[in-house]
Amino acid sequence: MVDIVTVLSILIPVLASILVSVASLAYWLGRRFNLIDERFERLEKEFSSFRDVFIQYNEIFVSLLEAKGMPSRGEVLALKGFLGSLRPQPTSKYYTEEVARRLDELLAKDPEELTLADLRELDRIADLIWNEGYESGRMDLREYAMKLKLYVMMVKVVFIYPKLRKLSEEGVVKPQSQPSR
């Protein structure tokens, strides 16, 4: 018969070797996952910056279209109706029932009556919906958030900016000066 001491003397070094290998592999994988996480965080920051640049580009583009007489009041109202009828159901973390109610209140207003504060709030709501969609993986929320941002841009360009230009021409409001370099 095989002596138990002999079996243990063979198994213990083999098991120890396996444990050391598993621990080394776990340590190496942990370092690799940390590097991957850091890269994803950098990509996420770059993507957010790209998103902001894209939104600013769209606002300039919509401003150029407005100079040519488009978009019209009717097109802004059509987008508003679209946003009101296809509003996604709220979830829980960012896009809550309370946020959805406030969104409904702001979308019920005539776009000509919206203030810059209202538009900032709509933009904030769009960011909340975007964050909810990003974290939950819901593409419908991200798409809706971008359409809401487009609505905010269109209201600024079609209704707010012309009022500000008129007030500036009348001397009621001074145009914003360019930052010094």
Image: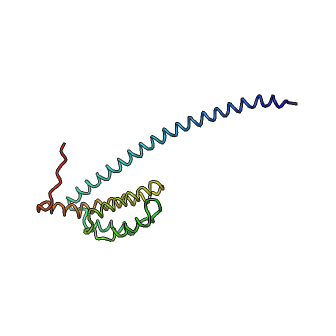
Residue lying farthest right? 1
Residue drawn at x 29%, y 54% as measured from the top left: 58
Left or right: residue 10 compared with residue 113: right
Q: Quadrant of residue 83?
A: bottom left
Above or below residue 5? Residue 125 is below
Residue 60 image position (x, y, % from top left): 25, 53
Left or right: residue 20 compared with residue 123: right
Q: 114 or 152, which is in the foreground?
A: 114
Residue lying farthest front? 5
Residue 12 image position (x, y, % from top left): 74, 31
Residue 32 image position (x, y, % from top left): 52, 37
Residue drawn at x 33%, y 59% as measured from the top left: 123
Tell me the quadrant of the picture where the C terminus can be found: top left
Q: Quadrant of residue 95?
A: bottom left
Left or right: residue 114 compared with residue 179: right
Number of residue marks: 0
Q: Quadrant of residue 74?
A: bottom left
Q: 68 or 88, which is in the foreground?
A: 88
Above or below residue 83? Residue 8 is above
Tell me the quadrant of the picture where the N terminus can be found: top right
Residue drawn at x 41%, y 43% as measured from the top left: 43
- Looking at the picture, the colour scheme in use is rainbow
Residue 176 image position (x, y, % from top left): 18, 54
Residue drawn at x 15%, y 62% as measured from the top left: 167
Above or below residue 42? Residue 87 is below
